[in-house]
Amino acid sequence: MDGAGEEDRQHFMMGNEEASSCVMSVEQTLLEEEVMDSLSKSLCPREMQVLKLRYGLSGQRATSPADMGELLGISRERVRQIEKGALKKVMADDTHNLREFLWML
């Protein structure tokens, strides 16, 4: 293959990688929205807020229990209690598509 043909092939491959990455990003965003919607139906707003902050959901960065406690005006132990209760609810509810969501992260 001549130099120009090789360059065209590399450019084509780079374009496919970018398109594939874009598709994966869209799929992850849609799945995240689906999971968040599903979670919001079974968790109270405080539990949702704690899980979002703790695990960096919805594009946020993960936050420590101490930082969350300051932010929410509660103790870090209370944050842990809320987190534990929320996770218990999530694990007991089979309607969430969590395995697929976590696999994509």
Image (spheres, grey):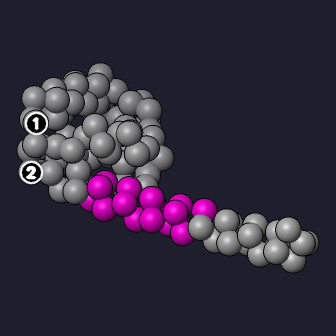
22 falls in the magenta region: yes
What is the three-letter code of the residue carrying label 1?
Asp
* Residue 35 vertical placement versus 22 (above, below): above
Q: Mark on residue 94?
A: 1
41 left or right, relative to 17: left
Picture coordinates of residue 99, whole percent (x, y): 28, 37
Front: mark 1 or 2:
1
Is 87 left, or right, of 23 in this rendering?
left
Q: Quadrant of residue 86?
A: top left
Q: Secondary structure at mark 2?
A: helix
Q: Is residue 72 visible?
A: no
Q: Which residue is mark 2?
A: 41
Which quadrant is home to the C terminus? top left
* SS at mark 1 in the image: loop
- Which residues, given as a range, are shown in magenta? 17-33
Place of residue 34 in the rendered image (x, y in percent of width and height, measured from the top left): 22, 57
Q: Position of residue 44 (x, y in %)?
A: 12, 45
Q: How many marks?
A: 2
